[in-house]
Amino acid sequence: MGWDLIALLVVPFAVSGACLVVPRRVAQGLTVGSGAVTFALALLLVPRAAAASALSGWLRADALSTVFLTAVAFLYAATAVFAVGYLRPPGERERSRRYTRRFHSGINLFAWSMAMATLVNDLALLWVAIEVTTVVSALLVAIDGTDGSAEAAWKYVLIASMGLGIALLATIVMYHAGTQVLGNGYEPFFGRLLGAAARFPPAVVRLSYVLAVLGFGTKMGLFPVHTWLPDAHSQAPTPVSALLSGSLLAVSFYAILRYYQITVRAVGPAFARNVLLAFGLASLALAALYLTRQRDIKRLLAYSSVEHMGILAVGMSFSAPVAVVGVLLHVLAHTAAKGTAFFGAGSVVRSLGTKDMRRIRGAIGVLPWSGPMLTLAVLGLCALPPSGLFRSEFLIVAGGLSDPRDAVVAVLAVLVTLASLGLSWFGTQTMLTPTPESVAVGETSGWIVASMVVGLLALTVLGVHPPSALSGLLDRAAAELGVPR
């Protein structure tokens, strides 16, 4: 009776508390175990044809939420493995223990808050969960205690709080739209809202939707409310950067899609798609411009995230069901690719001691395992086969070509190509150049290598042949968005 949904939230929350009091090695082991259990529980939801619920309907996992929960759980598990090899805080031994405990507690709490956002069955609780992700992730961005990390965390809190203030207004406005049909004092469960959405006041729903895209788009990294993202990704510890880019942005997109569902049923699909198209194209244009100018390896990957969030928004603007399936597959593939890329970037920074790409040379020779895998992850982000991003973008483009506004596909292709040039420059200049003789050759940790192997394996499976259960899940999720295949 929904025990799996309850366990998905209890396990990481309990481990988060335990990490504050147990020895640091035990904290590492608990975090790895919690990530593995959470991912296994998420996989159990994938083949279900019907939605699962718990706590009298307050928790609910349908096909759409399961897609995003799977992305969160996978990266949580992979990051827990990566953090074991990566996390070597500076300073005295006692400070190192405190740092490690706080860090692992924060990682587990961050994963818990993102899982909660995908499982709550209430519009207001969805906003609360995303607000919790902001608080926890901001503390993790600032955990190193440097001036740069403190400034990035402060900027993140300011901009995200403004965005979530707008999202709260969107929640209130949508609730008001529901009172016109459901009466005062109703619980804004998603099923109840979707069932009555056709009778909601159209103008009120449109206002709520625009506010939701702008508000939650702040956390998703859409232009022009993306400005916190490059600084936070650059200054945060690499495991945190991976979760921010690969999971948090996706969870914010999930919140937008919940409003998309209601808006499509209330006013038709055209308005909802046009709003996402405008934000998506603007985000793609910005990313294409900035990716060719970056010199910080983590900022480069941050702007790559802006690019892929733009692709998701543009993909949802196409009317063909295959494009929406491509968007949902893109969420999963981007999680695997971006997590792996950040893991590789963390290995490079750990080995060479710099994030400045002008000073990184021959990394593929310095790091015999993580160097080539980082190169493959970057090529995957460029959507080269057999990456899952190639498959997802192919589906999006195929859907766009069947749309009456197929000229948008040409713009999409040009902007994605320009963005890929920036990533390709990074690969050529930093990875494939001759290895300096003065640099020691060798991996810093087998844990880092293991996490990257898992990420690349998942990315390849999504590109070559996604499991039938996963394909069925994507089809059901697309149908829940109002576009049956």
Image (cartoon, helix red, strand yellow):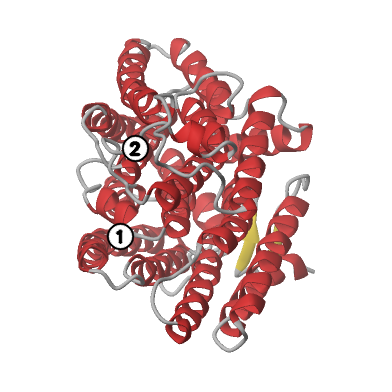
Q: Is residue 481 visible?
A: no
Residue 276 relative to residue 92: left or right: left
Sequence-wise, the earlier of marks 1 and 2 is: 1
Q: Is residue 357 visible?
A: yes
Query: How many numbered tags mark residues here?
Result: 2
Marks 1 and 2, how far apart at CA: 50 Å
Q: Residue 340: give x, y in percent of width and height.
A: 53, 42
For disc 2, the marked residue is 360
Mark 1, residues whose alpha carbon is within 10 Å: few (<14), some, or many (≥20)? many
With respect to residue 282, does 232 lie above or below?
A: below
For disc 1, the marked residue is 173
Q: Residue furthest front?
A: 438
The amino acid beneath tag 1 is Val
Going 22% across and 32% down the picture, which residue do you hit? 290
Going 68% across and 62% down the picture, which residue do you hit? 38
Q: In the picture, residue 345 is in which quadrant?
A: top left
Say which of marks 1 and 2 sits in front: 2
Quadrant assignment for the C terminus? top right
Q: Is label 1 in contact with label 2 (beta carbons under 8 Å)?
A: no
Mark 2, residues whose alpha carbon is within 10 Å: few (<14), some, or many (≥20)? many
Going 65% across and 41% down the picture, which residue do you hit? 453
> Which mark is on residue 280?
none
With respect to residue 78, does 392 lie above or below?
A: above
Q: Residue 164: give x, y in percent of width and height.
A: 29, 62
